[in-house]
Amino acid sequence: MRLHPNDFEERSIIKLITYSYKRYTNLFFLMAPFLVILLFIEYYTFYYLADNSNSVINSLNPIIQFFLDNLTLAIYFSFLAFLLTSQSSNFFTLQLISIKQSLHLLVLLLTSSVIYFLLVMIGSVIFIVPGFLFLIWFYLYPFTLSFERVGVIHSFKRSRQLVKGNFFRVLIVLLFFLLLREALYFVLTAIQPYHILSYILSSLVTIPAESICLLLIYFSQRSEKEAIEYRSFLKELA
């Protein structure tokens, strides 16, 4: 089991990010391979769609990119959830089990990602503020789907419950990693010509730590709101 009892502790933003990178450093070789696969799939899917679409569809590229980013993250968040809670100690077995379990939820993750995307887009088009609220409120749905074995709609409700009172905490985490990722991408692109390399490296530096950060927020909120701690959480998973 790669979870620690202190993963359920409340932390300041700075300590949360620092601890996330510490955990990521220790788990790098477990966390990185599947993410690289997902990033390659997303990258080439996006450019395949862009190269085989008309000008009208191409004008929607930022929206398509947002959806693909969100779906990739949802699958990776689910993978991380199973990776950290698997009992296996063998590298290849652990990878296969975690990937299999996350892909077992693929239909739910895809459905949830579509609904999440539509809520954010429609909310943004109508009043802007609702879209922004939906973006943050429901961001933890991959974890609620993976850990709590709930349906799509209930996964959004659970995410909303857990984010309540921590809205700006989640927002700051997302903004920090987004800005860091964009800055790294800009620098890497400036010093070498391969966009895919810049994309993969900037994502590898940020996405796993961001995922751990959000997972720690999930754990700390369940601990605070529901008195769930390490041992009781393991019993819940059994």
Image (cartoon, rainbow, N blue to C red):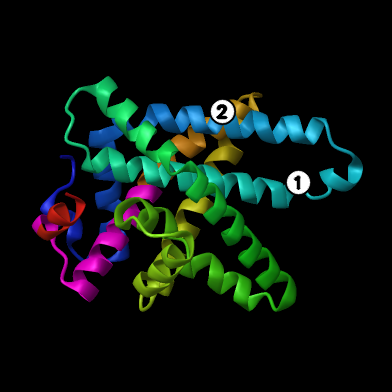
Prevailing secondary structure class for the magenta stretch in the rendered image = helix
Q: Amino acid at mark 1?
A: Asn
Mark 2: secondary structure: helix
Q: Amino acid at mark 2?
A: Phe
Q: Which residues are magenta?
A: 210-231
Seen from the viewer's position, the closer of residues 98 and 16 is 98
Residue 190 is at least partly visible in this image: no
Q: Is residue 40 left or right of residue 5?
A: right
Mark 1: secondary structure: helix
Residue 78 position in % (x across, y down): 39, 45
Residue 216 is at least partly visible in this image: yes
Can you identify the residue that label 1 sits on?
Answer: 61
Question: Looking at the picture, does residue 166 appear above or below residue 142?
Answer: below
140 falls in the magenta region: no
Please rate how many residues cluster around mark 1, counting C-alpha atoms within 10 Å: few if below 14, some from 14 to 19, many from 20.
some
Seen from the viewer's position, the closer of residues 17 and 236 is 236
212 falls in the magenta region: yes
Q: Is residue 185 left or right of residue 215?
A: right
Q: In the rendered picture of this protein, how many numbered marks are placed on residues?
A: 2
Pick out the residue farthest to the right. 55
* Residue depicted at x 54% and y 65%: 135
Mark 1 and mark 2: span between their CA atoms? 17 Å
Residue 33 position in % (x across, y down): 40, 26
* Residue depicted at x 83% and y 43%: 58
Q: What numbered label is drawn on residue 40? A: 2
